[in-house]
Image (cartoon, helix red, strand yellow):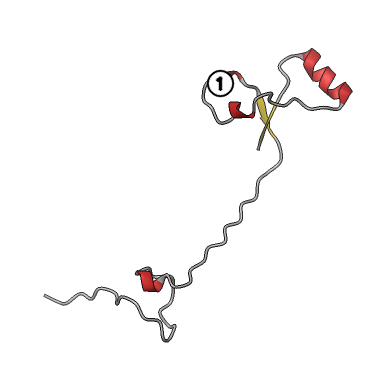
Amino acid sequence: MFVPESTSKLQKFTSWFMGRRPEYTDPKVVAQGEGREVTRVRSQGFVTLLFNVVTKDMRKLGYDTGPSDTQGVLGPSPPQSFPQ
């Protein structure tokens, strides 16, 4: 994760003294490309992503979601190749 950093020593001291870290005045700056190349940031912390994927009835839609040992599932049969 990136956090904004003070651009001068005075701003850095002031933010340390007041106990407030620098922040963007316009949060849209992060999403826009214009003006972002002059923004000072530093990496801090980490981000953990967790994906919950539901695979119920995916076989009915033609997707192979794992072993085919499930009973009673109706769906398209996989293509079969014939020797020539």
Which residue is pictured at 69% across the width and 23% down the height? 25
State left or right for residue 7 relative to residue 31.
Answer: right
Quarter of the N terminus within the rendering: top right
Which residue is pictured at 74% across the width and 14% down the height? 8
Quarter of the C terminus within the rendering: bottom left
State left or right for residue 31 relative to residue 12.
Answer: left
Which residue is pictured at 68% across the width and 25% down the height? 24
Image location (x, y in percent) of residue 68: 40, 79
Residue indicated by mark 1: 37
Going by the numbered disc 1, the residue's amino acid type is: Glu
How many callouts does the rendering have?
Answer: 1
Label 1 SS: helix
Q: Is residue 65 above or below residue 21?
A: below
Image location (x, y in percent) of residue 43: 67, 34
Looking at the image, which residue sits at the far bottom?
A: 71
State left or right for residue 17 relative to residue 9.
Answer: right
Q: Is residue 69 above or below residue 58?
A: below
Image location (x, y in percent) of residue 55: 48, 68
The picture quadrant where one finds residue 42 is top right
Which residue is pictured at 29% across the width and 74% down the height? 78
Looking at the image, which residue sits at the far left?
A: 84
Q: Residues within 10 Å of mark 1 (few under 14, many from 20)?
A: few
The picture quadrant where one finds residue 65 is bottom left
